[in-house]
Image: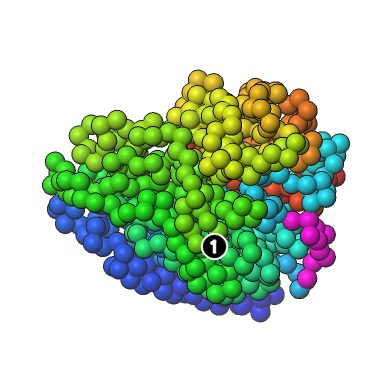
Amino acid sequence: MRATLLAVVIAAPITAMMGAVLLQAQASAGEKVFADRCASCHSGAADARAPAPESLRSRSPLAIVESLVNGAMRTQGSRLTGAERRAVAEFLTGRPVEGDVSGATTGKCATPQQPDRTGARGWRGWSPIPDNARFQTTENASLPVGDIPKLSLKWAFGFPDASSAWSQPTVSGGRLYVGSQNGTVYALGATSGCIRWTFAAAGGVRTAIAIGDGVVYFGDTGANVYAVDAETGTQRWKRSVESHALARITGSPTLHDGRLYVPTSSYEESQGADPLYACCTFRGSVTALDAATGAVIWKAYTIPDEPQRRGTSTAGVPLWGPSGAAIWSAPTVDSRRGLLYVATGNLYSGPAHAAANAVIALDLKTGSVRWSKQVTSNDVYLTGCRAGNPNCPETNGPDVDFGSPPMLARTRAGRDLIVIGQKSGIGFALDPDKNGETVWEYRAGRGGVLGGIEWGSAVDNERAYFAVSDITQPQPGGLHAVSLAGGEREWFAAPRPPRCASGRGCNAAQSAAVTAIPGAVFSGSNDGALRVYSTADGAILWEFDSNREFTTVNGVAGRGASMIGPGPVVAGGMVFVDSGYGAFGGRPGNVLLAFGLK
């Protein structure tokens, strides 16, 4: 007993000393990052617009991490690793951030290998196959419609330093691969959620993860692309695909025939709200990389010519344009025609350009444009525009760009269509054999800045399924089933009463991507509920309310909230979905939920 007490007495100051040494080391690392990346703005000078280091000391370290991840400093934070963001926060506040930056202190797999219970029944990227239809076959889903009411929560996984669970998981070979807001990428056991390995990217990883030939591929918020060994988590290669300071990758890379097709978007749409920013110079692009080496095969900009000087603002800052036409979503492969389809966003600055709010068909081999179909012209938009900002267009918006990818579908009669939903609230079917000529249009929502059809729809060979956001409208939400052949409504599932408590971000908007399997459609809602609908008539087959705290397999405090962005993944008899999204009108959360049969 005396020996035990003596050990405790000795160990206590040693532990405290080790903690102090660790914090001092972090502070030193954070001081360097601050000096290199932050001090030029946070100088403390009288004319400095950013707060001085002394004024930040009273904040909590997590508040600073949150600002760098999802707040006012997210653009600057996107160029830092999770460890660097923590180091800066600890340097500025003099206090530690609790827990491991990777969230992998506990929950590691106990055995070298797990039984492969999913086998080939996986989900490999934004969609199970590169057509981006978000349709999973009966064999791969292994989830009969009659068994859906038997689904129950099997495990939950918490993401540290995150206010959004924003990376859609990929399932392959009994493993689940997923990125996170703080840049940690995880390989988990699909049936248990235990951690196989972690990898630290240089920025947040919002993309779904592509996988092929034992390698996983993903992009980060610093416009870097990674190839990582699927078994060990060892980096094979890393490639920057865009040099613009505000570039990022939000659309998931698409892997096909030895090539990785990577889209780029940017933060410049929000940066332009600063009247002292020289607006705007970013152009969306897609880059074809050799999947084995990361070498660039070709790169195609949505706006071919570099922006030109278009004058000087009243603030004395140069003005540039045209800019924008970012690619927010995954590219779609049409191997039969040798084409790659991408969907573009609005312009950030004029003059008007036909590449914005368009579906563009590129040659798979060369990246040359075969055809382009614009559906909304003259859409120049910057976020946060206020009176007196010289960067803002005379008419701001309407900001009804494409946030979801083109879906290549085939009707029962054998006709190919490109189906896509727009933030205008309209779903389109285009003819790939007639340069994108419109076959039908369907009005699903009212549309607007956070309205219409946001992250993604789904199609089978009979219907297209459009979920509606309309988050700022009096009556948001709803799911529409539309005849694939003719564009007529077959049924409409009205939005359900919200499951969350009343308040900001609690509404029935259905912004998240939709997933279909034979007989059922899965749709997450801003109210925090995941619902499964019958494809026959829209009746609800099953519902789960994620608005609560979860005990996670890795010990990270986890909470569910708004489901915005990535859609449910169905594979091997299980359903995986992210919960929590602290932006775009959502409520923050940080969990990945896994459901299986009882």
Q: Specify the quadrant that holds the N terminus.
A: bottom right
Residue name at image x 43 percent, y 33 percent? 376
> Is 243 on the left or on the right of 540, as rendered?
left
Is residue 469 visible in the rendered structure shown here?
no
- Taking 257 as reference, is 361 above or below it? above
- Taking 258 as reference, is 502 above or below it? above
> Is 509 on the left or on the right of 348, as rendered?
right
Q: Specify the quadrant that holds the C terminus.
A: top right
Residue 166 image point, x, y percent: 55, 49
- Taking 193 as reference, is 145 above or below it? above
Residue 443 image point, x, y percent: 55, 24
Residue 289 image point, x, y percent: 52, 66
In depth, the one of 374 and 163 nearer the eye is 374
The amino acid at mark 1 is Lys
Q: Is residue 119 magenta?
A: yes
Spot the residue most to the front: 434
Q: Report the number of discs.
A: 1
Residue name at image x 38 percent, y 71 percent? 29
Residue name at image x 78 percent, y 56 percent? 121
In depth, the one of 186 and 110 nearer the eye is 186
Task: Quickly name the residue at label 1.
Answer: 365
Disc 1: CA contacts within 10 A as few (<14), some (14-19) or many (>=20): few
* SS label for mark 1: loop
Residue name at image x 59 percent, y 56 percent? 338
- Which of the colour schemes (rainbow, by chain, secondary structure, one colour) is used? rainbow
Is residue 492 visible in the rendered structure shown here?
yes
| Magenta stretch, residue numbers | 113-122
The chief SS type of the magenta part is: loop
Residue 139 image point, x, y percent: 83, 50
